[in-house]
Image: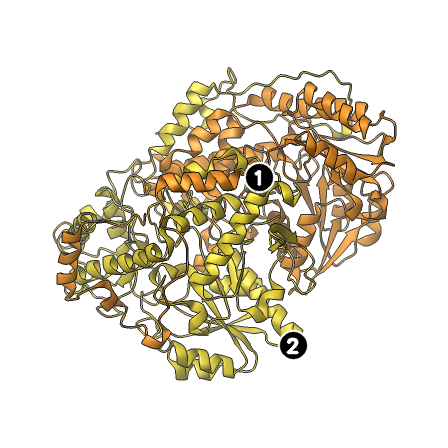
Amino acid sequence: MEKLLNELSSQSGFAYDIKCDVEADFSIPENLKRKSDLGLPGIAENDLLRHFTNLSRKNYALSTVFYPLGSCTMKYNPLINERIAKYDAFNSIHPCQPAETMQGILEIMHGLEKDLCEISGMDNFSLQPAAGAHGEFTGLLIIAAHFRSIKQKRTKIIVPDSAHGTNPASAAFAGFEIVPLKSEPDGSIDVSKLKEVLTNEVAAIMLTVPNTLGVFESKMREIAKAVHENGSLLYYDGANLNALMGFARPGDLGFDVMHINLHKTFSTPHGGGGPGSGPVGVKSFLERFLPVPRVEKKNKKYVLNYKKTKSIGAVKSFFGNFPVILRAYAYIKALGGNGLKNASAQAVLNANYMLAKFKDKINVPAGTRCMHEFVLSPKAALGGGVRTLDVAKRLLDYGYYAPTVYFPLIVEEAVMIEPTETESKETLDKFIETLNKIILEESVNEPQKVKDAPSNTPVTRLNEVEAARNPILKWKNR
Amino acid sequence: MDYTPKNKHDKQKMFDVLGIKSEEDLFDSIPVESRAKPLNVSGGHTEQELLEHFKNIAAKNKTLVSFRGAGIYDHYIPSLVGEITSRSEFWTAYTPYQAEASQGTLQAIFEYQSMICALTGMDVSNASLYDGATAAAEAALLALRVSGRKKILVSSGLNPEYIKTLKTYLQNFDAKIVLLDLSPNGTVEKATVDASSDGDTAAVIVQSPNYFGIVEDMQGLSETAKEKNALFTAVVNPVSLGVFQAPGEYGADIAVGEGQPLGIPLSAGGATFGFMAVRKGLEWKMPGRIVGQTTDKNGKRGFVLTLQSREQHIRREKATSNICTNASLNALAACVYMSGWGNGGFKKLAETNISKASYAFGKIKNIDGFKAKFEHSVFFNEFVIETAKDIKKINKALIKNAFLGPLDLSGSGKQFKNCMLFCVTEQRTKGEIDKLVEILAKV
């Protein structure tokens, strides 16, 4: 067990020191002074280095194991992008510098916007949103602003029950009411069911394509027609864009607004949960509502334009998560148009290959072909009262991170697998063999072993109920 | 380079299993009329080419010696921070859904929460938000949720980026933002808060040090807010808390701020992180992830994501926020940063900021044509100077010397006409400050 910092600390050392080379008189009135102890640990650098290095070794990470986390697109994070992102001339730029002293930053932002337009078929992008959900929120504010501008009162957003939880949460956050839409067993949308809820109060429908079961929405044209004829807009959740690059573009499919998760499709590291980046793209009729500032090119120079009177405003400070934007741009420049298409092709090939190896033994609610990910429902195949959660934990014992489980909500005991394009057949084969073994053999022959998993990890099964019932959310003795 | 497997033999085997001739066959479900044309995206470069390409682009940026803050600060980042955040076990992991395989990230975030609570004097911290601006906006939403009231009072001394973001976040809500004017001293007066608040006031949001560098009387403002049963929300610079009163000491209900000063590079203002800490009782209403301590089957201590029934993946449209991905790696950086100073060192860091800023303040205000805007105010590492000279010209002269000069405050209202905001952190040497003074005197 790795000690906590406050247990390591005897206030006998410190790692960082500072000198002051000026003498200045200042006095702080008593009433403004801090009275309480700072409560920080005092630990020498040597010990801190060991502490944090040892902690890092308790993580399963993409750099150590296969990470088939569905909907998260855990593809290889190229090291060259990390190297570029560490350049001082990118890191040491203050956001309030004059634009002429950060032409490099602006050139990259402008370049990425342009490439994202080409890849997605949208007309304009804003790189300001800091994550996927933040992009959704921004897109929905744009939709609200659009209807305000044409003086239509539309207060509802349709969200299929197979959608990511962020969709309804973002819509509510943007002030909309949610209309749930029941999707078909394969996660697809039934156009007649859609029409039933498509009233003149509906501002937009949020769709994930391919959907969260890994199926392309084959009735996309009909859906787009019905939605647009109703005067509503189509929102594209870009979480699954990795299936489509070079094959289909949301803009061509009829979508009006979308976001992209740069930390999924464009290989930027997930960082243990961020920082990410969630650029928002729109068709030209919505451009004026995009967040400010906008990066523009004038007389061969890049400038920041804050004077957009119809803009929804700013959704965060400054321009966006630049280091993430930079890595995504470097990734696109490594691959180019052909490489991007090949990435999607290989991602879909890898997913289908895995699916083919499972489909005869484990229930697949969405059929035998998929796009970049697929969902298994192993309920019937599992023996001995073993549940999907147990299978996930058992996978950890074999040195794999677990797939996404219990999502999408419409699939019982769901196991959602997304291999991505950067894994070899050899890696996939070993994983397939292991997952089949756990579900088909271990759950039947040694169910208790699976229920007791994991046992090879730094800790065994953790008590989440207890954590929520008696929350301990910081060091106890401080 | 596309980072995909290159073994043709393997690929053929996969095609055989699937009974296909090429990957194209797997895209049958996309109707032909919906197919994309070949992408017109340049690229296909090797590593060497990329290095060269981006080196050339980077050369178009100018790295400057910074005397500008306004929300993003040039602080020294100790070597240990980069060493730890560069460990691929941290940066290539994802959100710690599988706790047993994510104890590194989870314990580090638990330690981060502990130290944010220690610094702010608050009871509960979340695992991070996107940045200071969105943290302030989330604090306003939290207050609206908790109180059921409709009005948010906001100090005009709040960073204008935060005010803009707050307005954006609340634009579709039945809620009203009321800006509190600053007194001639550059601070929010208790009387102003008192006069503007009523039974519908959900929160009073005050930044200290405020955007103009001045440390506010947070104790008095907090008491006034409480008299009206409004949630007092403190927006604070975490490094300043080494010396100045902590939000917990003056009874703040919510403390938020920009985490960038805690070991995050300037990076054109992002990616940074926002922190949020609340008093006990508000944790179930708080947005974002929270890590909690628990035990495993053998009674061994471990960490998990907890209070998850607040979050979007469980509650969907009824969640306290839509946030999913936050800024975990930067919270880790802050964790490493906060852990290495010790109490004395962190206090010394804050004092050094005050010393250097005071030294620069004393010199600059005595230059001909310059004067202190708020002569007797208490400041941390930023201060306002008024001048009869042309501020644009001043900044041009400084840029020529590779200095990033003060922020022109002409956009901050009449009160700040001919004013500029200087920032001096521990990074600036005596030599640099003297040189700044020399250039200013010559303009």
Please state, as top left, top right, bottom left or bottom right, where the C terminus of chain B lies in the image.
top right
Instruction: Please say if the residues under marks 1 and 2 sit with CB atoms less than 8 Å apart.
Output: no
Q: Position of residue B84 (x, y in %)?
A: 43, 30
Q: Position of residue A108 (x, y in %)?
A: 51, 48
- Which tint was used for chain A? yellow
Q: Amino acid at mark 1?
A: Asn
Mark identifier at residue A150: 2
Q: Is residue B13 visible?
A: yes
Q: Position of residue A146 (x, y in %)?
A: 61, 71
Residue for point 41% across, 59% down: A239
Q: Position of residue B220 (x, y in %)?
A: 78, 39
Q: CA distance from mark 1 to mark 2?
A: 42 Å
Vertical relation: A227 (above or below) A307: below
Chain bearing mark 1 = B
Q: Secondary structure at mark 1?
A: loop
Front in this rendered view, residue A32 or A44: A44
- Which tint was used for chain B? orange
Left/right of residue A155 with respect to residue B358 in the rendered view: left
